[in-house]
Image (tube, rainbow, N blue to C red):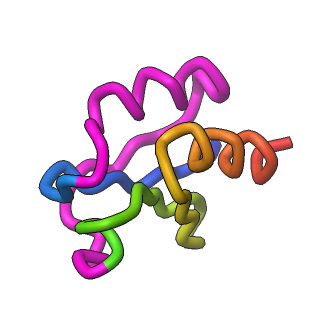
C-alpha cells in the first residue's frame, strides 16, 4: 500500500482536489494529512510525500503526472 503525505496548510494547491485525483490513480493509497515539514516548497509549488520520498511539481498537473510515473 502506498503512503501519501499531503499538507493541508500549504497554499500552493487544494489538498482535497489533489486527494481525489490521486484516488483515481491508486484507490488503495493511505493518506497522511497534515504538515509535512516542507513549508518553504509548499508556499510555491505543489508536492506530496510518496512512500517517504518528496515529489514536487511545477503545477498540479505536473505533480499528478509525476505521481503516475512513480506508481507505475
Seen at 64% across and 43% down, the residue is 1
Looking at the picture, does residue 29 appear above or below residue 10? above
As for residue 52 lying within the magenta part, the answer is: no
Q: Looking at this view, is 72 or 31 the one in front? A: 72
In the drawing, does residue 14 fall left or right of residue 26? left
Give the x, y percent position of residue 61: 57, 38
- Give the position of the C terminus as an image quadrant: top right
Q: Looking at this view, is 58 or 24 the one in front? A: 58
Say which quarter of the image contains residue 13: top left
In the drawing, does residue 20 fall left or right of residue 36? right
Give the x, y percent position of residue 44: 31, 66
Seen at 62% across and 47% down, the residue is 62
Residue that sits furthest to the left in the current view:
9
Looking at the picture, does residue 23 appear above or below residue 41? above
Looking at the picture, does residue 60 appear above or below residue 19? below
Give the x, y percent position of residue 58: 53, 58
Number of marks drawn = 0
In the drawing, does residue 67 fall left or right of residue 16? right
Seen at 49% across and 49% down, the residue is 59
Give the x, y percent position of residue 5: 40, 56
Seen at 18% across and 53% down, the residue is 11
As for residue 28 lying within the magenta part, the answer is: yes
Q: Which residues are magenta?
A: 12-40
Amino acid at each position: 500500500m502506498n503512503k501519501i503525505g499531503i499538507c493541508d496548510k500549504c497554499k500552493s494547491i487544494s489538498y482535497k482536489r489533489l486527494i481525489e485525483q490521486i484516488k483515481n490513480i491508486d484507490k488503495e493509497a493511505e493518506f497522511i494529512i497534515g504538515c509535512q515539514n516542507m513549508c518553504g516548497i509548499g508556499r510555491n509549488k505543489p508536492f506530496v510525500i510518496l512512500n517517504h520520498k518528496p515529489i514536487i511539481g511545477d503545477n498540479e498537473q505536473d505533480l499528478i503526472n509525476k505521481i503516475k510515473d512513480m506508481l507505475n
